[in-house]
């Protein structure tokens, strides 16, 4: 079905009007700028995944493909004017498997993760990500471990397999123990799956803390500017000799140390701004 000439003229006028309005919205509406930036962020990641898929497919599903994804994503922080500062990278155990646990604030966590991601380390992600178009396929090729959180039995089975993989294939895993994104500038209670995994495999836990994004990013306020994020790698926590009965205390101890560091690096002027200094703020209230 062909469009009549008047329809083409109307489409052209609408396109020109859009080109005219975009700069105005960009400079005059922080909310519009927020949506433009987030749309580009997600779209750019999908595009990078399209480029990565044929390169990763040469190896098939392999944890070494994570190096390719990391290399392709390192530049994104420059596009958004975000400075990522890493401290404590020397705490990574040099030659053994371990479980990384990190706080989870938003999809921007990818920037900090890619900055500090150690070799042969893959995230554990919710199964829904597998169906996220090109990004899902790229993650599968990179060895990302997918878990269906709604089916507890399957999740436990997968974690048991992961424990064996850690030991037999010298793999590290990255887990967000909060279980979901937390936009309120603090940390949610930790789920214990990552700690059961570390205890079952008898491997260390390496806590990683990313400072609050509140000085440059806030979903509720529709604000996304440039800024600084600090990523702090904490000393590994050993699990040798621990049993499942020790997991609750282990999870609480690790969360407490991470929350302490989170408050420190989110209020020292080197990431996170003054949000957590505000009286009655979430970070201050959750002691």
Image (cartoon, rainbow, N blue to C red):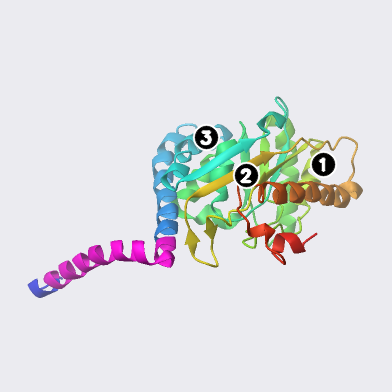
Tell me where residue 130 appears, x and y as whole percent: 54, 52
Prevailing secondary structure of the magenta residues: helix
Q: Nearer the viewer, residue 122 or 211?
A: 211
Q: Nearer the viewer, residue 49 or 277?
A: 277
Q: Earlier in the sequence, mark 1 or mark 3?
A: 3
- Extreme left residue here? 5
Look at the picture and state if 286 lies above or below 79: below
- Residue 70 tag number: none
Viewed as shown, does residue 230 lie left or right of 192?
Answer: left
- Please give the residue where the numbered disc 2 appears in the rendered image: 123
Q: Secondary structure at mark 1?
A: helix
- Residue 65 tag number: 3
Which region is colored magenta? Answer: 8-35
Residue under the point 71% across and 35% down: 166
- Residue 200 tag number: 1
Q: Do callouts 1 and 3 mark residues in contact (Cβ within 8 Å)?
A: no
Q: Secondary structure at mark 3?
A: helix
Q: Nearer the viewer, residue 253 or 47?
A: 253
């Amino acid at each position: 079905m062909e469009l009549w000439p008047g329809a083409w003229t109307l489409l052209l006028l609408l396109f020109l009007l859009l080109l005219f309005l975009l700069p105005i919205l960009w400079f005059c509406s922080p909310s519009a700028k927020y949506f433009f930036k987030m749309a580009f962020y997600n779209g750019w990641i999908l595009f990078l995944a399209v480029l990565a898929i044929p390169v990763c497919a040469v190896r098939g599903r392999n944890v070494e493909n994570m190096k390719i994804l990391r290399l392709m994503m390192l530049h994104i922080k420059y596009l958004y004017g975000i400075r990522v500062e890493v401290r404590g990278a020397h705490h990574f155990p040099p030659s053994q498997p371990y479980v990384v646990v990190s706080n989870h604030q938003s999809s921007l966590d990818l920037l900090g993760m890619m900055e500090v991601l150690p070799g042969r380390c893959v995230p554990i992600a919710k199964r829904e990500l597998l169906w996220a178009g090109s990004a899902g396929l790229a993650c599968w090729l990179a060895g990302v471990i997918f878990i269906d959180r709604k089916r507890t039995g399957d999740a436990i089975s997968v974690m048991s397999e992961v424990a064996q993989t850690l030991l037999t294939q010298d793999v590290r895993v990255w887990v967000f123990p909060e279980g979901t994104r937390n936009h309120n500038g603090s940390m949610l209670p930790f789920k214990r799956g990552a700690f059961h995994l570390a205890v079952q495999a008898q491997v260390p836990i390496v806590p990683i803390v990313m400072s609050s994004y509140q000085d440059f990013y806030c979903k509720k306020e529709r604000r996304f500017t440039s800024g600084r994020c600090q990523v702090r790698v904490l000393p590994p926590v050993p699990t040798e000799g621990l049993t499942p009965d020790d997991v609750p205390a282990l999870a609480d101890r690790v969360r407490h140390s991470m929350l302490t560091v989170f408050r420190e690096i989110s209020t020292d002027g080197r990431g996170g701004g003054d949000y957590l200094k505000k009286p009655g703020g979430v970070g201050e209230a959750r002691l």
